[in-house]
C-alpha cells in the first residue's frame, strides 16, 4: 500500500488577548474513492480570544484542492478567507476579521479535495502551533493526526467479459466485488479470481473453516479417470480452485487486493483445470462435449449438453485431454480429514457422456444429460449414477 503525507502547518495565530486554554486544529479521518472528491473538515477547539489564524496545507502529488469551493464553517462565519498556492506546492490559508471578531469553537473550514487515480493510504498530521498577540507568542496549541483512505471500488460481473476492466486496472489496488457470484455451503464450488488472496483476506470474506484445493495430478485406472487435489492456503491470481465454505456467501467484496493479469491452467497428464474470470465460451460447434466437465451442485460432475458451451466467471472447469478420451467414469480424490472422510471422496459422475449412442431399456435413443439409470451402449449395459 502506498503511503503519502498531508501536513496541515499552522504558521501563526493572532489573538486579541492572551488565552490560557490550549487551542487545537484538527481534521477528521475520511474515506474516498479514486478520482472522486471528498471534504477535509478543519475543526477548532479552545479558540477563546483568537481573532485570526494562518496555516499551510501540504498535499502529496495527485491530491488537489478545489479552492474555489472551500466553505467556511460556523466558527469562522464572520471572517475573511484568503487562499494562496505557494511555490513549494503548499496551500496557504488565512482567516481574519478587521473588526477583531473572535474565532469560535466548531467547524472552521470545509476543504474539498480530489483524490488520486489509484488507491492509497494517505496519512497526515497537524503540526503544533502557537497563539499570539500582536506583540508576542503567548501559548501553545495542539494538533492531531488524520488519515485519508482512498478506495478503488471495482465490480466484476460473472456473466460479462471482464478482460478490459482487469487489464486497465492491472497492478492497481482495489476493493473488488464479484457481482452475481454465490458460493454455497455444504459442497465444493469452483473458484478463480484475478488477484492474490492471503489466508487473512479469504477468512475476512468467507469466515473461518474455508478450504481451498487445486488439481495436483490425474491418472487412469481401467476406464476410470481420477483427479487428485491438494490443499492451498494462498490463492494465486488466475488459477482455478475447489472452494468449500461454511456459510453461503453472495456477491463477495475483497478489500485492498492488487489486480493481476497473471494466470494459468493446472495441467496434469489427463486433465486441465481451467479458470474463468468472466463469461467464457468453451470450444466450438462440433467439439466433443465429453471432453469438458463441470462441477455442479451437490458435488456432481456433468458434461455440457452442447458445444460450444458457456461458463460464468470466477469459476473453473475440467478439460479432458485426448489421452483420457476413453474414460467412462470420473472421480475426484480429496484428503478431507476434517469432514471425517478417510482419504478419498468420490463425486459421482452425473450425465458424463460417451461419444457412442445411448439407448434406454425400451430401445429408445437418448441424449444430453442423462438421469440415473441403466442404458445400452454398444450392446452392453452401462449404469449412470
Image (cartoon, rainbow, N blue to C red):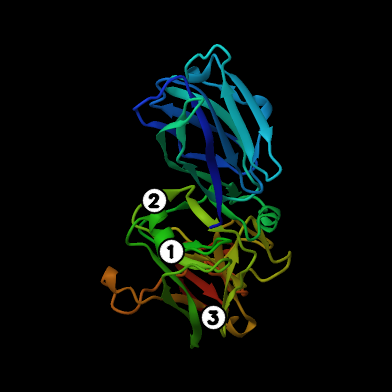
Residue 267 relative to residue 187: left or right: right
> How busy is the neighbourhood of tag 1: few (under 14 within 10 Å), some, or many (20 plus)?
many
Marks 2/1: CA distance? 12 Å
x and y, in percent, of residue 59 in the image: 61, 44
- Whether residue 283 appears in this view of the structure is yes
Q: Secondary structure at mark 2?
A: loop
Marks 3/1: CA distance? 25 Å
Residue 254 relative to residue 63: left or right: left
Q: Quadrant of residue 96?
A: top right
x and y, in percent, of residue 195 in the image: 56, 62
Q: Secondary structure at mark 1?
A: strand
User: Which residue is label 3 attached to?
Assistant: 327
Q: Nearer the viewer, mark 2 or mark 3?
A: 2
Between 324 and 62, the one nearer to me in the picture: 62
User: Which residue is label 2 attached to?
Assistant: 248
User: Which residue is label 1 attached to?
Assistant: 243
Amino acid at each position: 500500500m502506498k503511503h503519502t503525507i498531508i501536513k496541515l502547518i499552522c504558521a501563526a495565530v493572532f489573538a486579541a488577548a492572551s488565552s490560557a486554554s490550549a487551542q487545537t486544529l484538527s481534521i477528521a479521518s475520511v474515506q474516498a474513492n479514486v478520482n472522486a472528491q471528498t471534504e477535509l473538515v478543519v475543526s477548532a477547539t479552545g479558540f477563546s480570544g483568537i481573532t485570526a489564524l494562518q496555516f499551510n496545507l501540504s498535499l502529496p502529488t495527485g491530491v488537489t484542492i478545489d479552492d474555489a469551493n472551500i466553505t467556511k464553517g460556523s466558527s469562522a462565519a464572520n471572517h475573511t478567507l484568503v487562499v494562496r498556492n505557494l511555490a513549494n506546492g503548499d496551500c496557504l490559508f488565512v482567516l481574519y476579521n478587521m473588526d477583531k471578531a473572535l474565532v469560535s469553537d466548531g467547524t472552521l473550514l470545509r476543504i474539498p479535495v480530489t483524490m488520486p487515480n489509484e488507491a492509497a493510504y494517505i496519512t497526515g498530521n497537524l503540526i503544533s502551533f502557537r497563539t499570539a498577540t500582536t506583540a508576542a507568542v503567548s501559548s501553545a496549541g495542539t494538533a492531531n493526526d488524520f488519515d485519508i483512505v482512498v478506495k478503488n471500488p471495482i465490480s466484476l460481473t460473472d456473466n460479462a467479459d471482464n478482460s478490459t476492466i482487469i487489464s486497465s486496472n492491472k497492478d492497481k489496488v482495489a476493493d473488488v466485488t464479484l457481482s452475481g457470484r454465490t458460493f454455497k455451503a455444504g459442497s465444493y464450488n469452483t473458484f478463480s479470481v484475478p488477484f492474490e488472496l492471503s489466508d487473512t483476506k479469504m477468512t475476512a470474506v468467507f469466515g473461518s473453516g474455508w478450504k481451498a484445493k487445486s488439481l495436483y495430478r490425474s491418472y487412469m485406472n481401467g476406464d476410470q479417470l481420477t483427479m487428485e487435489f491438494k490443499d492451498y492456503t494462498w490463492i494465486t491470481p488466475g488459477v482455478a480452485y475447489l472452494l468449500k465454505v461454511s456459510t453461503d456467501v453472495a456477491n463477495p467484496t475483497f478489500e485492498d487486493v492488487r489486480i493481476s493479469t497473471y494466470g494459468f491452467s493446472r495441467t496434469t497428464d489427463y486433465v486441465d483445470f481451467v479458470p474463468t474470470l468472466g463469461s467464457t465460451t468453451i470450444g466450438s460447434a462440433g467439439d466433443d462435449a465429453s471432453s469438458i466437465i463441470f462441477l455442479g451442485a451437490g458435488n456432481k460432475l456433468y458434461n455440457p449438453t452442447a458445444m460450444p458451451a458457456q461458463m460464468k466467471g470466477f469459476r473453473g472447469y475440467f478439460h479432458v485431454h485426448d489421452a483420457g478420451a476413453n474414460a467412462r467414469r470420473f472421480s475426484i480424490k480429496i484428503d478431507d480429514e476434517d469432514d471425517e472422510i478417510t482419504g478419498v471422496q468420490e463425486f459421482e459422475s452425473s450425465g458424463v457422456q460417451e461419444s457412442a449412442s445411448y439407448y434406454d431399456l425400451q430401445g429408445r435413443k437418448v441424449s444430453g444429460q442423462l438421469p440415473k439409470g441403466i442404458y445400452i451402449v454398444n450392446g452392453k449395459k452401462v449404469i449412470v449414477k
